[in-house]
Amino acid sequence: AWRFPEQGDYLTGSDAELTEQLYELLADATRIRLRADVPVGAYLSGGLDSSALVALIRRHSAAPLKTFSIGFEEKSLDESVFQQQLVEHLGVEHSRIFCHNRDIAEDFPATVFHTETAILRTAPTPMRRLSGLVRASGYKVVLTGEGADETLGGYDLFKEAKIRQFWARNPQSEWRPLLLKALYPYLETSGAQAKAYLRSFYGIGLEDPHQPGFSHLTRWFNTAQCKIFFSSELNATLREDAATKLIGQLPNAFDRWHSFNRAQYLEAKTLLGSYLLCSQSDRMLMANSVEGRFPFLDHRVIEFTNRLHPRLKMRALNEKFLLKQAMDGHLPRQILERYKQPYRAPDIPAFFSTRPPAYVDDLLGKEKLKRYGYFDTKKVGFLLNKARRGSAIAYKDNMALVGILSTQLCHDYFIERFSQTIHEMSATSR
């Protein structure tokens, strides 16, 4: 269960003792998930989590190991160099699939068919292609690193919340918000306009840093911007705010947890369950009849890590501190010390770097937008024009367009022509 101790009631022991306990728990959780009547492979992204699992498999299993990864056309998203470094270091047999932008655009409808829900990112699409590579290689089971960021404090969101908590102690400080520059180096903070943006966006909620959703306010605010594209008819039916509902269901002890643990709980109860494990992971695996196994989500690992003091998860702004300690000597220093690169895939560029596939123009055209009734045709038209000009580069623009397109696809597949969709998808999967 995702429960945390009240402050002061954390696990005791030296860093070395707790590091050893974490290592043994992860090793056993990994060993258990290698049990199968068929060969078991593993995903190898080039990041710490999957690398740790592969290192544990190599250390505690004599069976040959096959690993799988994705490479991207966009260099900023591609981790192939790190993947290759690990393949050579760990001595595994490896297969990689390369994902072009056009692949994402062409495969996105099938992805939505398998998620069976609207999504705000294209990231599940390459994962479905990756599970296809696993199946084509003769494997039916893979170990993956899901859950490490939630259990051991790996997300930039946790760093951001930590900085914002520090900033909130002196909201008028000129230099405290500039710590975000270390977290997001692409933020231009030299001009007055940029500083004003930093304060208006990242300063959300500073007047009450103890409120239950403080850690996630910036994310929730950004995501909520997608609602401006809703049609007046849809807005008239909305009666409930998701964030308010979530906060109303928090455990009674929530307010007595450390702020870092509160952020972990919210992340586990929102993004992990409803998106990462569902849409991006399990459904993309099962689309190709591949079973995913997640050692970091072993109940013993969760119970142990939840009882750790937050400083063992994030030491200053050094994420997953105890995991790095546990894997020291098992992985190259470059992997242990590299800046975390979250898994992402191209969103708007996947559809508009070349001519969009026909279904994009069809589903985002005025006729179907108006007939399906979810979105304002004029506002969507403005967003489409930005995308075609290449000026829709904001995170909220990407989320909005993918969300609108996936919603239209869901309606088209599961309401407009359900029987035909089932027939078409069954035919293509044979």
Image: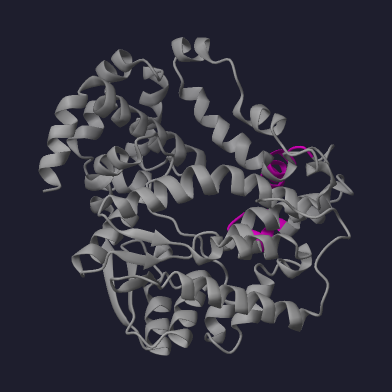
Residue 429 in the figure: left or right of residue 309: left
Residue 363 is situated, as x and y percent measured from the top left of the image, at 26, 27
Residue 322 in the figure: left or right of residue 398: right
Q: Is residue 194 magenta?
A: yes
Q: Is residue 14 magenta?
A: no
On screen, residue 176 above or below 52: above
Give whichever of 34, 186 is nearer the camera: 34
Residue 296 is situated, as x and y percent measured from the top left of the image, at 55, 65
Residue 380 in the figure: left or right of residue 367: right
Q: How many marks?
A: 0
Residue at 29%, 27% in the rendered image: 364
Where residue 322 sits, quadrant-wise, is bottom right
Residue at 75%, 53% in the rendered image: 4
Residue 164 in the figure: left or right of residue 98: right
Where residue 97 sits, quadrant-wise, is bottom left
On screen, residue 18 above or below 308: below
Residue 184 in sight from this viewpoint: no
Residue 408 is situated, as x and y percent measured from the top left of the image, at 32, 27
Residue 211 in sight from this viewpoint: yes
Residue 158 is situated, as x and y percent measured from the top left of the image, at 68, 55
Check the image and tell me how it is coloured. one colour
- The region drawn magenta spans 180-205
Residue at 37%, 83% in the rendered image: 87
On screen, residue 163 above or below 207: below
